[in-house]
Image: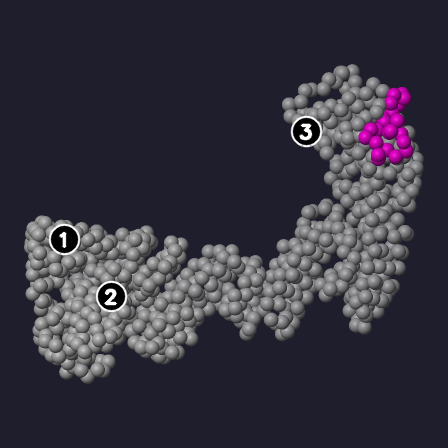
Amino acid sequence: MASRTNKIRPIRKPITNRDQSEFEPCWALLRDAMTDIHLQNAGRLSFEQLYRASYKIVLRKKGALLYERVRDFEQEWFRDHIMPNIAALITKNLINISLLQHPGSSSHERREMGEKFLRGIRDSWTDHNRSMNMIADVLMYLDRVYTLETKQPSLFAVTIGLFRNNVLRSHIGAAAEDIEQDFVVFDILCAVILDLINMERDGDIINRNLVRKITAMLESLYETDDEIENHRLYLTLFEPRYLEASTEFYRKECEKLVQEANCSTWLRHAQRRLNEERERCGTTLSIMTTDKIASVVEKELIEAKLDVFLAMEGSGLKPMIDNDRLDDLSILYQLISRVDSTKSALKVILQRRVRELGLEIEKALKNTDFSVAGAAAGDGEDAGEAAEKAKPQTLNPAQQQTAAAIKWVDDVLQLKDKFDRILSDCFCDDLLLQSAITRSFSDFINSFNRSSEYVSLFIDDNLKRGIKTKTEAEVDAVLDKAIVLLRYLTDRDMFERYYQKHLAKRLLHGKSEIHTEKEMVSRMKSEMGNHFTSKFEGMFKDMELSKDLTDNYRDHIASLGDADYKMVDLNINVLTTNNWPPEVMGGGTSKGEGAKLDCFYPPEIKRLQESFYKYYLKDRSGRVLTWVSSAGNADIKCVFPKVPGKETGPLSKERRYELNVSTYGMIVLMLFNDLVDGESLSFDEIQAKTNIPAPELMRTLASLSSVPKCRVLLKEPATKNVKNTDKFSYNAQFVSKAIRIKAPVISSISKVEGDEERKETERKNDQTRAHVIDAAVVRIMKQRKLLAHTKLVNEVISQLMGRFKPDVPLIKKRIEDLLAREYLERVEGDSSTYRYLA
Amino acid sequence: MDATNGNGGASKYITLVSKDGFEFVVLREATLCSDYIRGMLRNNMTEARTGRCELQDINGVILEKVVEYFHYWYKYRDREDVPDMEIPVENCLELVVAADYLGMDSKPH
C-alpha cells in the first residue's frame, strides 16, 4: 500500500434512475444537519450517517449539485442570520468616531465602542469558522473526490471565504447614508484596531487578546478562494494601513521629541518603542509584521532626526563622549547599528571629536608652555609635579617644556584610554569604529609636529624617573602605552632619531635599567621590524663590549703592577660611530667646527688615555679612538683642609668628599689643584688652559659654582649667570652633609629641543630622508628597468610607509637629482617614463 | 469500557463496530491515519462523544483487516524499511473500497 502511485477510485456502480431520486433525501438530511451545526446543536448528529450521505451523493455523480447547494445554503444563512447582527453593530456613532474621526469623544468612550464592535465581529467569526470546519469534515468526501477532480477551491475555502465577501466587504448600509465615501465593514474594523493600538501607544490598556483574535482572522482569510499565501487579508489589507498609520504616528512623535526632549530621553524612548512594537507583534498583531514595523520605527523615530539629536547641545553625542555617558552611548550604538550598517553619522562625529580633543591637548600645552612654573602646577598632574619640584628655582624653559611633552603624551594616552573604554563597553569593539578612531588619533598626533620627539621623551622620562620604584606590571603597562603611541606615528624615522639621542644619554649616564631598555627595544622590534631597531641594538652591544673591555683593561693594568695608574680608575665606553647619535659623538648640535678640536687633558689623564689606546690597539689594529669629552664623567676624591681659625663646626675639621662631575668638570677642577690659596682664574684663562668649548665651559662652571650643594668654586661676582669676565676661585669653606656629591650634569637631562635645535634636527632628518628615497628609487628601478613616473612614486611611498610618509615633491626632486646624476634617464618620446642606467 | 463512558475525548481507545456487529477497540492515535475518523473525532457529534462508531457498510472481516492496518501504520509510522502487510487477495476489492471511504489514501498526518 505504501508504494501505491495511482489514485484509487471508488467502484462505479451501475447508474440507475433510482440514484437520481436518492439525492433529495440525502440532501435534506445534510441540510438539516447544517442548520443544527450553525445553531450549535450538533451533538445529536451522527457523523457516519452524514458522511455516508455525502459519500452516496458523490458516488452518484451529484457532487456539483451538492457543492452548489451547500454554497447557496451558507449564502442564505449569512443573509438571514448573520448580517442583521453585524448591521446592528455598526452604529452611526461608531462610524463617526472610527471613520470620520469626529472630535469630542474620549478615548475611553472610543475604546468601549471599538471593543464592542470587535467582539461582535469576533463572535460571528468564531461561530462561522467552527461551523465551516465541521461542515467541511462532514463533506470531506466531496472535497476529496469531486472538488479535486474539477480543480475547484475546496468547500471550506469557499464557505469560509463567504465571511470575507459577506461581512468584511459588505457596504455600510442604512447607518451611514450621509457619508459620501463608500466604506465597507473592513474599513471600520481596521480603523478601530489602529485607534486601539494608538491608544495603547499612548499608555492605555486595551484588550490585546481581542485584537489578536481579529488579526488571526485576517491572517486565515485570503483575497480569493484560491488561498494564495501572499494574499492573506492581513497582508494585503491590514498591514499596509497599519504601517502607514504607524509611520504617521512616529513621525509626529519624533517631531515632538525634537522639540521637547533631549538626546538621552530620545535614545531611551526609541529603544522602548522598538521593544514595544516587537512585543505588540507577538501579542496583539502578527509576527509577520515584526521586521516591517521595526523598520518603520527605525526610519521615522531614529533615522529621521538622527543628526539633530546627535548635535544637541548638552545631550548630544559630543557631551556623551565628554562626560563618559556610557549607557547612552551603548543605546546609541545599538540604534545606529539598526539603521545604518556603516554608522556614518556616529563615525563622523566621533572622529571629529577625537581630533578636537586631540587639538585641545595641544592647545592646553601651549598655554602651559607660556605660563611660568606656578601656573603649570594647577594644570594636569605631571606638569604640576615637575613644576612643584622646580618651583624654588623657577623652572627653566627647557625643563618646563619637557614636562609639557610628558603632559602631552599622558593626555593623549588618557584620551586613548577613554575611547578604548567607549569602544569596548559601548560599541561592541566595532571594527569600523575602531579603525575610524585609530585614524583620527593618527591624524591629530601626526598633525602635531613634535609628536615623535614627545613620545620619545615620554619613554625617556618613564624609563629614567620611575622605573626603579615600579613593579614589573607597571613597567609593562608603560611600555605598552609607549608602543600604542608609536603605532600612530607616521614619521617613524624622526622618532628613531630622537629615541637614539635619548637612549644614548640614558645609557652613557646609567640612568635606566638595561633590562627594561632591552625590553622596550624588543617590543619596538616586533612592532616595527628589524631595520628600525638595529641601531639601538648596536648601542646595547657597544655598552656590553665596553664593560668587558673596561674589566679586561683593569686586569691588564693590575697585572702590570704599575702603581702610577692605579690612581685613576678608567671606565670606558667604546661607541661605534654609526650606531650613536652625532650629538653624543661630539659632533655637537650648535658648536660648529670648534668642537672638533679636543680639549687639553691634564697629564694624568693624558697618560691614562695613551695607555688605554695602546691596550686597545693590541687586538684591534687600525682602529681610531676619539675621546668624547662631552659625554663622560668622573669621580674625584677631594680633600678640604681644616680652615684656620675655625675651632668648632664642620669647618674645623678636614673634610673628604667624593665629587661626581662631568669630564669637563674634572678638567676644570684639576686646574685648581695647582693654584695657591686665594688665587683665582678668569673664565678666559680657564678656557685657554683647557680648550673646552665656551658654552660647555659655561655650563660646567655654573654647575660647580652656583648650585649650593656642590659649590666647590667661588665666583666673582656671585651672580647666577656665568660671563666671560668672571673669576673663579677655590672654595675652601665648602661643606656638605653628604660624602658623595653629584654635580648636576646638565647635558644628561633629555629635554625638548629649542627651535634652533629642532630646525637642525629636521634638516638632518630631511637629508637622511633624501638618501633613503634615493636608495628606494634606485632599488626599484634596478629591478624594474622601465617604469612610469606615477608608478614609481607610488612604489616608493609604499616601500617607505613603515618609516615615514614621504611627500611627493621631495620624491620628485630626488628623481630629478638621480636623472642629473645619470642613474636614470627619460625614455625618448615618453617623458613620464624612466629607464634605469646600469 | 472507557471508550463508552460518554466522553470519548478522554479515552485512549475508541470502538469501531462493523456492519455485522463485530466490535474492535482501537488505540485512538492509531486511527488518525484515517481522515474519516480524524474528522469524526474532532467534531462534537455522537461518535465523538461516545467514542463508538458504527460503520454501516463495512463487514467484520474487512474491518478487522483495516484495524490491523491501523496498528501496522501506528507501529511503523516513523520508520523506514518496514515489512509488507499481508493482504488476502480475496478481500482486496472490498478493502480498497473501505480505505477510500475512510480517507486512508492521503499522506499520513
Q: Which comes before the other along the chain, label 2 or label 1?
A: 1
Q: Are marks 2 and 1 in contact (CB under 8 Å)?
A: no
Residue A123's disc is none
Mark 3 and mark 2: Cα distance apart in space:
99 Å
Q: Residues within 10 Å of mark 3 (few under 14, many from 20)?
A: few
Amino acid, disc 1: Arg
Residue A664 shows in this picture: no
The residue sitting at 81% across, 30% down in the picture is B12
> Label 1: which residue?
A554
Residue at point 31%, 55% (across, down): A516
Task: Tell me whether the residue at label 3 lies in contact with that at label 2, contact meaning CB atoms closer than 8 angstroms.
Answer: no
Query: Is A681 in front, or is A385?
Result: A681
How far across and down, in percent of the image, does residue A410 sit? 39, 66
Q: Which chain carries label 1?
A: A
- Residue A208, x across and y down, in percent: 76, 56
Q: What stretch is highlighted in magenta?
A: B1-23
Q: Name the residue under label 3.
A: B78
**Residue wearing tag 2:** A739
Say left or right for A644 vs B30: left
Tell me the element at label 3.
Answer: loop
